[in-house]
Image: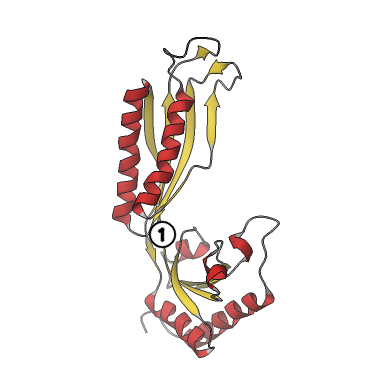
Amino acid sequence: YFELHIEQGPLLEQEGIPVGVVDRALAQAWLDVTVTGEDFHAGGAMAPRRDALVAASMLVQAVEQIAVAEGGRGTVGRITVQPDSRNVVPSQAWFSVDFRHGDEAALARMVAALRAKAEQVARARKVKAEVADFWYCPLTPFDPKLVSALEQAARTRGLNYTVMPTGIGHDAVYVARRVPTAMIFVPCEDGISHNEAENITPQWAEAGLVVLADAVLATAGRAKGE
């Protein structure tokens, strides 16, 4: 199985590289973080507050700091607050965490670091902070022979390429669990995807297509393991 896709990131365009040969998919850990404090009127004094949102904001910042420190990726994409009232100190804040890394041990360290930070913040802010596992996807290597076929196709065509991971859960990540799989990336303008501004040039599309076609023809008819 071969999959051709835009990079959904800026690296290829910035480096002037028309083809990315994808050799693996990053491991991913999704977490749910719930911080529970206490309702308190906004007109009340500051000192006794157990503000769940303020505590949660410290953990949101920690997600970015941990990801940078480990050379991984960390994102908070959703936040909800209760009771969601303009004049009430939030009693509960929930947010999602998306950690990704090319090393499963490093990913485990990232999760552990967030749990440790949550305990620290909970003590300091007099709140309860729970970090719960939501979903995990292991590191997924792609088939070395198919990756080599893509590299050879790019070299034969005289196309500059780089070998790189994908941090995104493409179809290929799941297909790879059953059959030999590899991916090709082509640049996209400013790394934008899933947006009306998403765009690629005909030249980028052609580069990906010829590498795809050549690799398919080179491997057609081969049984698994050949």
Q: Residues within 10 Å of mark 1 (few under 14, many from 20)?
A: many
> Can you identify the residue that label 1 sits on?
26
Residue 55 in which image quadrant: top left
* Residue, far top: 44
Question: Farthest residue in the right direction?
Answer: 196
Where residue 10 appears, x then y in whole percent? 55, 63
What secondary structure is found at the residue carrying circle 1?
loop
Depth check: give the residue in front, 107 or 124. 124
Is residue 217 shown to the viewer in this render?
yes
Left or right: residue 207 versus residue 196 is left
Looking at the image, which residue is at 66% across and 55% down?
Answer: 195
Q: Tell me where residue 204 appears, x and y as whole percent.
A: 62, 75
Q: Nearer the viewer, residue 46 or 188?
A: 46
Q: At x 43% / y 23%, what residue is drawn? A: 36
- The number of numbered badges drawn on the structure is 1
- Is 115 situated left or right of 51 in this image? left
Tell me which colouring the rendered structure shows: secondary structure
**Above-or-below relation of 53 to 46:** below
State whether residue 221 appears in this view. Answer: no
Q: What quarter of the picture does the C terminus occupy?
A: bottom left
Q: Residue at x 41, y 59 (%)?
A: 26
> Compared with residue 88, is residue 4 higher up or lower down, i.e. above or below?
below
Dot 1 amino acid type:
Leu
Tell me if residue 91 comes above or below residue 209 in the rendering.
above
Residue lying farthest front? 46
Residue 25 quadrant: bottom left
Q: Residue at x 30, y 48 (%)?
A: 109
- Residue 45's spot in the image, x, y percent? 48, 10
Specify the farthest residue to the bottom.
Answer: 156
Q: Is residue 45 left or right of residue 102?
A: right
